[in-house]
Image (cartoon, rainbow, N blue to C red):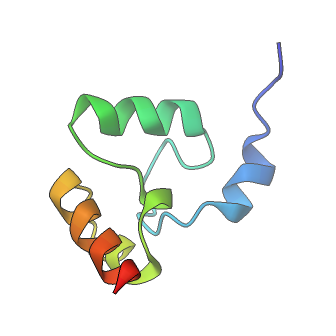
């Protein structure tokens, strides 16, 4: 089984929520946000990510802005 390379992933992670314990551990991050009906930071634009609104609705608004 492939070991998680947290330090390498953490460098690329765009999540700006600093107290996040799942930063750099994608499988835990995705599990956490899915359990809360949310989308992880890496799916959002830089501007939308900074709002900390991880709702599915905000994700769709962000996607519409990207396509406009």
In the rendered view, does 20 fall on the left or right side of 8? left
Total numbered badges shown on the rendered structure: 0
Q: Is residue 3 visible?
A: yes
Image location (x, y in percent) of residue 45: 44, 75
Quarter of the figure that contains the C terminus:
bottom left
Image location (x, y in percent) of residue 59: 28, 61
Instruction: Point out the residue furthest to the front here.
Output: 68
Quarter of the figure that contains the N terminus:
top right
Q: Nearer the viewer, residue 43 or 9?
A: 43
Image location (x, y in percent) of residue 28: 50, 31
The residue located at (28%, 66%) in the rendering is: 52
Q: Nearer the viewer, residue 11 or 18?
A: 11
Residue 54 found in image quarter: bottom left
The residue located at (72%, 51%) in the rendering is: 9
The residue located at (20%, 54%) in the rendering is: 55
Image location (x, y in percent) of residue 65: 31, 82
In the rendered view, does 47 fall on the left or right side of 35? right
Instruction: Point out the residue furthest to the top here.
Output: 1
Q: Nearer the viewer, residue 52 or 37?
A: 37
The residue located at (45%, 59%) in the rendering is: 43
Residue 44 found in image quarter: bottom left
Instruction: Point out the residue furthest to the bottom here.
Output: 68
């Amino acid at each position: 089984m492939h070991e998680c390379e947290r330090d390498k992933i953490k460098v690329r992670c765009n999540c700006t929520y600093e107290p996040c314990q799942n930063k750099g551990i994608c499988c835990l991050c995705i599990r956490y946000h899915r359990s809360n009906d949310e989308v992880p930071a890496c799916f959002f634009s830089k501007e939308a990510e900074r709002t900390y609104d991880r709702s599915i609705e905000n994700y769709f608004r962000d996607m519409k802005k990207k396509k406009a």
